[in-house]
Image (tube, rainbow, N blue to C red):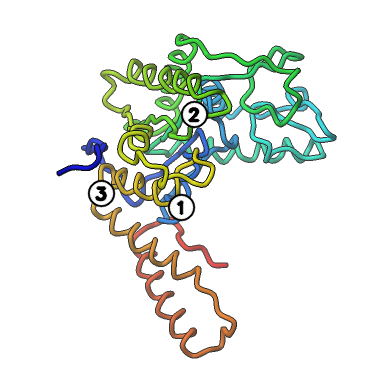
Amino acid sequence: MKFRTEVDIKESQKKIDVEDKIFSIGSCFASEMSDLFMQGQLQTVNNPFGTIFNPFSINNSIKRLHDAAFYHEDELITFNNEFISLDHHTSFDTRYIHQTLAKINAKIEEANSFLQNTNWVIITYGSSFIYEFVPKQKLVANCHKIPQKFFKKRLLSFQEITESIYNTILNLKDICVDDVQILFTVSPVRHTKDGMIENQLSKSKLITAIHEMIDGLDYCHYLPIYEILMDDLRDYRFYKEDMIHPSHQAVNYIFEKFGNAYFSEETKEFIKENFKIHQALEHKTDDDKDPKYIEFREKLNQRIEIQRQKVKHKIFPDD
């Protein structure tokens, strides 16, 4: 007997190899997946603008990265004695305008360079809702805890979403390697503050738009991450205490399903060993001169060196 409805990710004919570069952008779930890529010692860049949820802002970010278009003073605003970009996450905010611009533009330079050699792009949309900053009549990626009275909230139209997806694909195809693969997914994190009915409407618009825009494009794929958590892991034990975000166990389950569909056999073994090494590196001691601990570290360093011989890029950088 079957006691759950399992959702599988369709196996990809093209596989992620150990030297491939993976760029990810979007919601906080994109960051969780990217963290696992990093633990597996794959080459990855994630969210150079910080966490972004809606397709319009993600497309704006991709366009800026494609053009290597740096930000300037007149594009920032001030709030609570900090200089802020409404296109970015709050982690870019500082008390000095040159510091905010330096952080923003360094990420643009890094991501532009990375994208030019990127093999895989993972885009995770979180919401169809967007906010307009009324004083500048500007659609924003983040409200930075500025009072609500300065914003208007609305759903993106279906045309706005599809145009954003279309332009994102065009810019990625232009800047990335010729055979870049673009993977679209919808975050399983429910935006309960929007309302449960509104959240379902928001997610539905995203899913429908993605399927319509990538139909017939063999280099674009849909990953059913939202469906896996909603229909496969349909139990609150797979959520964190807030009952909104997927648990560590759920994220690992989804990552394993993704890997089975998209990783080459070599990549699977490479990541599996690197996960074990990463876990071993977390082991701490009160006595680093203990002979047993020294032997443990020597054997661990040997394993790391074996892994380093398998790739050209740097892995497990020295402290």
Q: State the CA–CA distance, disc 3 to disc 2.
A: 28 Å
**Res 126 label:** 2
Which amino acid lies under the numbered mark 3 shown in the image of this protein? Ser
Question: Residue tagged by mark 1?
Answer: 38
- Residue 124: x, y in percent? 45, 32
Residue positioned 45% across, 43% down in the render: 246
Q: Secondary structure at mark 3?
A: loop
Give the side of residue 117 with respect to residue 106, left or right.
Answer: left
- Residue 27: x, y in percent? 51, 34
**Is residue 260 positioned above or below 64 on the image?**
below
Of 50 and 286, the residue lying toward us: 286
Residues at badges 3 and 2 in contact (C-beta under 8 Å)?
no
- Residue 247: x, y in percent? 45, 48
| Screen quadrant of the N terminus | top left
Which amino acid lies under the numbered mark 2 shown in the image of this protein? Gly
Labels 2 and 1: the sequence-earlier one: 1
**Res 161 label:** none
Residues at badges 1 and 3 in contact (C-beta under 8 Å)?
no
Of 308 and 95, the residue lying toward us: 95
Q: Secondary structure at mark 2?
A: loop
Q: Residues within 10 Å of mark 2 (few under 14, many from 20)?
A: many
**Is residue 295 positioned above or below 203 on the image?**
below
Question: Residue tagged by mark 3?
Answer: 264
Residue positioned 33% across, 37% down in the render: 228
Residue positioned 29% across, 21% down in the render: 217
Q: Residues within 10 Å of mark 1 (few under 14, many from 20)?
A: some
Which amino acid lies under the numbered mark 1 shown in the image of this protein? Met
Of 85 and 51, the residue lying toward us: 51
Q: Secondary structure at mark 1?
A: helix
**Is residue 309 positioned above or below 71 on the image?**
below
Q: Nearer the viewer, mark 2 or mark 1?
A: 2
